[in-house]
């Protein structure tokens, strides 16, 4: 009779609370253990993510009659070329433009302070501190490119080497991994198979779309800001690439920064810069975005902004980077399992009554 009256769900919930409490009390121990495990797993996680992002490029070459080893090799060579160009050319050029960007922003702040009677001492100090820390971080790359990176940290080089080696393996084995995973899901549940198939399609659309948009944005804004004569054209174009990680707000922030730095040079450059980002924003919103993404994989602006904000508050820069993919994951999961989750929640409430 006692067994029939025992609420096993309540007992399980109590056990879960006890486990969480014990983990909280021994948090320092678990943080250390998880930190070590994370340091070991992280290069392989990034390697899989990179291989997953590069897989469509490898498939493109194979569709054009490239043998699989050659397709993987060409794809990986493209990745190394992008890394080399970034650290060997882009980073030093961007580093050299930081000084001009700093002077223009500071000039604008001083002008606003003089004309509107604003005490900008704190703002100027914050700007100076930020640019000093940024310049210190980039000084190694800007002064000696790839060689500076190599001499900076042997531990970092080892991690990068492991990550790149694992990327080649994952890229080569991606077909077998996908086939094995699909076979496993088909045997388990058709709904699970359809869920992961749709999730894969949505993630692939996001990754491919992001790289296309980032590449187009870099070329587009380099040309636009170079035509109008902006002194920080390359740096602003690079920032516009990073801004794609923060939908809507990122692009607006970079355009405001471009206008501020242009105003510090001359009113004419300010007007031409405003015209440039109006043209660029129009092209992005009505031509390039719809052509790249189409009607699929479009996330509501409020969802994007909330995801980026929440990710940044919880996990910093990493949270911002993964916020949109996580939003895609949650939306796809709710699409397939939302009704099951709601029904399970209702059943739980009814059982408690």
Image (cartoon, rainbow, N blue to C red):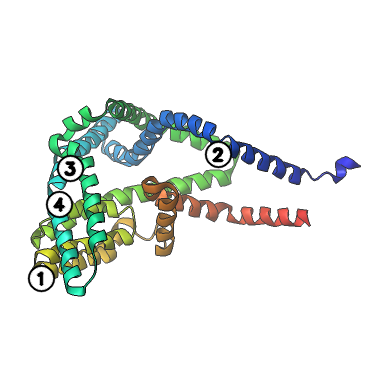
Q: CA distance from mark 1 to mark 2?
A: 64 Å
The residue at the point 12 percent across, 46 percent down is 96
The residue at the point 18 percent across, 57 percent down is 221
Task: Check contact, mark 3 vs mark 4: CB within 8 A.
Answer: no
Left or right of 50 in this view: 82: left
Count neighbours of disc 2 (C-alpha within 10 A) and say few if under 14, some if 14 to 19, many if 20 or more: some
Residue marked by disc 4: 234
Left or right of 329 in this view: 345: right
Residue marked by disc 2: 186
Left or right of 166 in this view: 4: right
Q: Nearer the viewer, mark 2 or mark 3?
A: 3
Q: CA distance from mark 3 to mark 1?
A: 29 Å
Spot occupied by residue 189 in the image (x, y as percentages of width and height): 59, 42
In primary-sequence order, the first of circles 3 and 1 is 3
Instruction: Compare residues 81 and 149 and report the one nearer the observer.
Output: 149
Task: Check contact, mark 1 vs mark 4: CB within 8 A.
Answer: no
Quarter of the image for residue 342 reads bottom right
Spot occupied by residue 49 in the image (x, y as percentages of width and height): 38, 38
Spot occupied by residue 204 in the image (x, y as percentages of width and height): 38, 46
Residue marked by disc 1: 267
In primary-sequence order, the first of circles 2 and 3 is 3
Q: CA distance from mark 2 to mark 3?
A: 47 Å
Task: Check contact, mark 2 vs mark 4: CB within 8 A.
Answer: no
Element assignment for label 1: helix
Left or right of 325 in this view: 29: right
């Amino acid at each position: 009779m006692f067994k029939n009256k025992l609420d096993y769900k309540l007992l399980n919930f109590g056990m879960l609370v006890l486990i969480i409490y014990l983990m909280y009390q021994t948090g320092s121990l678990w943080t250390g253990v998880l930190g070590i495990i994370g340091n070991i797993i992280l290069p392989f996680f990034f390697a899989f993510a990179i291989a997953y992002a590069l897989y469509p490029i490898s498939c493109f070459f194979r569709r054009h009659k490239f043998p699989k080893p050659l397709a993987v090799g060409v794809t990986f060579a493209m990745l190394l070329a992008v890394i080399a160009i970034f650290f060997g050319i882009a980073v030093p050029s961007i580093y050299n433009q930081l000084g001009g960007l700093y002077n223009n922003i500071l000039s604008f702040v001083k002008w606003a302070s003089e004309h509107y009677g604003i005490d900008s001492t704190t703002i100027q100090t914050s700007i100076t501190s930020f640019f000093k820390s940024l310049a210190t971080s980039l000084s190694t790359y800007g002064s000696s490119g790839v060689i500076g990176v190599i001499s900076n940290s042997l531990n970092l080089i080892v991690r990068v080497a492991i990550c790149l080696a694992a990327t080649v393996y994952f890229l080569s084995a991606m077909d077998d991994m996908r086939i094995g995973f699909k076979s496993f899901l088909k045997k388990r549940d058709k709904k699970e198979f359809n869920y992961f198939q749709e999730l894969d399609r949505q993630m692939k659309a996001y990754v491919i779309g992001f790289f296309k948009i980032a590449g187009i944005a870099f070329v587009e804004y380099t040309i636009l800001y170079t035509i109008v004569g902006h002194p920080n054209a390359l740096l602003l174009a690079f920032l516009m690439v990073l801004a794609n990680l923060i939908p809507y707000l990122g692009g607006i922030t970079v355009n405001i920064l471009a206008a501020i730095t242009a105003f510090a040079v001359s009113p004419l450059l300010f007007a031409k810069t405003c015209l440039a980002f109006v043209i660029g924003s129009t092209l992005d919103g009505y031509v390039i975005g719809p052509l790249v993404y189409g009607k699929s994989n479009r996330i509501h602006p409020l969802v994007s902004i909330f995801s980026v904000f929440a990710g940044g508050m919880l996990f910093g820069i990493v949270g911002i980077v993964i916020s949109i993919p996580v939003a895609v994951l949650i939306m796809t999961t709710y699409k397939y399992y939302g009704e099951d989750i709601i029904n399970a929640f209702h059943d739980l409430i009814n059982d408690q009554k």
